[in-house]
Every structure is written in C-alpha cells, then in structure tokens.
Amino acid sequence: MNNYWETSVYEEEVDNLVDNLSSLMEPFIMVILGVLVGGLIIAMYLPIFKLGAAIG
C-alpha cells in the first residue's frame, strides 16, 4: 500500500514538472516558428523584388 502512495506522489511531481516545462518552452517555440516562417517569406519574395528593381 505504501508503494502505491509513493508512486502517485512521484507521478504528480513529474506531471507538474512536465506542465511547467511545457509552459516555459511554448514562447520559445513560437518565436522559432515565427523566425522560420518570416525567413521563408523573405526568401520567396526577395527575388521578386530584385527582379522588379532590375526591370524598373
């Protein structure tokens, strides 16, 4: 019976740790995704703007 109590306590601690770690990582993941998407958009549109500048 004591072993069941210990495992439930440790499981709760691990769940809390994972929740805290997830909430800390979410902003960093959003920034990384934003930089990647922004870089992809710039990489797609920069040649179009350079072509327009060369023609005009």
Image: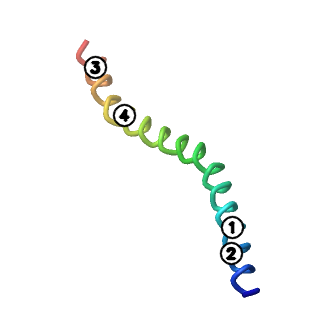
Mark 3 near mark 2, Cβ–Cβ under 8 Å?
Answer: no
Q: Is residue 53 above or below residue 30?
A: above
Which of the marked residues, 3 or 2, is nearer the chain's N terminus? 2
Give me the C-alpha separation between circle 3 and circle 1. 63 Å
Which residue bears the numbered disc 1? 12
Frontmost residue, 13 versus 1:
1
Q: Secondary structure at mark 1?
A: helix
Q: Residues within 10 Å of mark 2 (few under 14, many from 20)?
A: few
Q: Nearer the viewer, mark 1 or mark 4?
A: 1
Give me the C-alpha separation between circle 2 and circle 1. 6 Å
Which residue bears the numbered disc 4? 41
Which residue bears the numbered disc 2? 8
Which of the marked residues, 4 or 3, is nearer the chain's N terminus? 4
Q: Nearer the viewer, mark 3 or mark 1?
A: 1
Q: Residues within 10 Å of mark 1 (few under 14, many from 20)?
A: few
Residue 18's spot in the image, x, y percent?
A: 64, 61
Residue pictured at 44% horizontal, 35% vertical: 38
Residue pictured at 73% horizontal, 72% vertical: 9
Which residue bears the numbered disc 3? 54
